Amino acid sequence: MMPEIAAATILLAFAFTFTNGFQDASAIAATLIASRSATPRKGIVLVAGMALLGAVLGGSAVAFTLSGLLTLDPGGQTVLVLLAAVLSATLWNLAVWRCGLPSSSTHALIGGLIGAGMAAAGTGSVYWGFAELLAPPHEMVGLTKILFFFVASIVIGFAGSYLMRRTTRLLLRNAKKSVNSTIMRLNGITAALMAFFNGANDSQKQLGIIALVLFAAGESAALEVPLWARLACAVLLGLGTLGGGWRIMNTLGRRIFEIEPIHSFDSQVSSGAAIALSTLAGAPISSTHVITTSVIGVGAAENPRRVHWQIGKEIVAAMVVTIPATALFSALVYLIVSPFTGV
């Protein structure tokens, strides 16, 4: 039965990639379109195309970080854990998208892996990384590395955009309105670069799962990402961005803070830097959360009274709840399904 479970898990990973497109990748286009720096059609096509390129050319460092989160031995148990994790993450993405809330596909997948892994083999199934952090040479690995970059990327997104808005407001205080045309062109460039690194980071989460499924099921001799999986994830990420991201874009682009071209530029530079640094470091992060906090940071620097803080509170609540919710759901899925699979 293990080949069937492995095939179902890979298909679910592809479905998750599609939902990742309209959750995380669509957030990239939000400020570009809301600031009128691009039409909705041109903006989303640009982001989808660059995300596809990023997924193809972005390497595998993030994939190997994620695939190393579990310490289970290869076999049917690991494949079933991955099935439960991806299923819970996919359903969570659909639920929060339905509510129009930007949520983290990465957090959902991490929570799913932790919950199902612990249901299968207790706390020892997760590579926490605490011992390596506390003992010389104090390395950040496993969940510790992932959590560090989660927090660091969000701080960079908020603080960076806040400082960017303060700086650009000072530099452009005597600028003519015609400068907006230049800023709009720059927004297209920064959005394209951010979409590339986001595509590289986001697709690798699913690629790490697929590589681990193939290895655990005995279909590959080593933990590696096959080309067919990379191409499939790239296409699905792009299609997801094109097909379903309008709810998330409306929340990020209009409901938190009314974004002008300069606000989009400030947000994209800071959040793009955070996403690029995390991708190069091999750390899976939430681009949605980075962009969300960068929009809040820009609004706080411009005029805190114009920020719709209640929307921000709802998004933060979703951030906090995601990992525990998906961990609990994936654990339940594993415990319910495992007796019927014989693994």
Image (tube, rainbow, N blue to C red):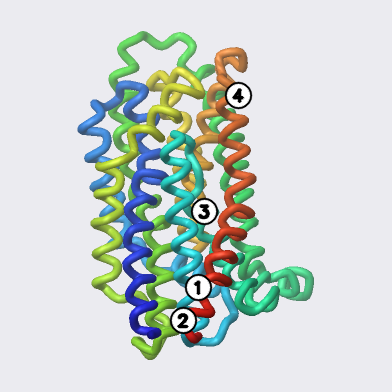
Question: Is there any visible trace of residue 190 in the rendered image?
Answer: no
Quarter of the image with the N terminus is: bottom left
Task: Look at 49% across and 11% down and name the residue there.
Answer: 173
> Which numbered disc, 3 or 4, marks the residue that appears first in the sequence?
3
Between marks 1 and 3, how big is the CA–CA gap?
Answer: 29 Å
Q: Mark 1 or mark 3: which is in front?
A: 1
Q: What element carries label 1?
A: helix
Labelled pair 3, 2 in contact (Cβ < 8 Å): no
- Give me the disc on residue 310: 4
SS label for mark 2: helix
As drawn, the label of residue 246 is none
Residue 341, labelled with which disc? 2
In primary-sequence order, the first of circles 1 and 3 is: 3
Real-space CA distance between mark 4 and mark 2, rounded to the nearest whole angstrom = 45 Å
Up/down of 170 relative to 164, above or below: above
Q: Where is residue 31 in the image (x, y as percent from the top left)?
A: 39, 29
Three-letter code for the amino acid on which mark 3 is drawn: Ile
Q: Where is residue 326 drawn, in percent x and y?
A: 56, 56
Check disc 4 and report its element: helix, strand or loop.
helix
Q: How crowded is mark 3: few (under 14 residues within 10 Å), some or many (20 or more)?
A: many
Instruction: Residue under label 1, please give it.
Output: 337
> Alpha carbon of mark 1 to alpha carbon of mark 4: how far?
39 Å
Amino acid found under the numbered disc labelled 2: Thr
Select label 1 or label 4 by which is in front.
Answer: 1
Label pair 1/3, CB-CB below 8 angstroms: no
The residue depicted at 50 percent of the width and 55 percent of the height is 106
Q: 16 or 66: nearer the eye?
A: 16
Q: Position of residue 269 (x, y in %)?
A: 45, 37
Residue beneath disc 3: 285
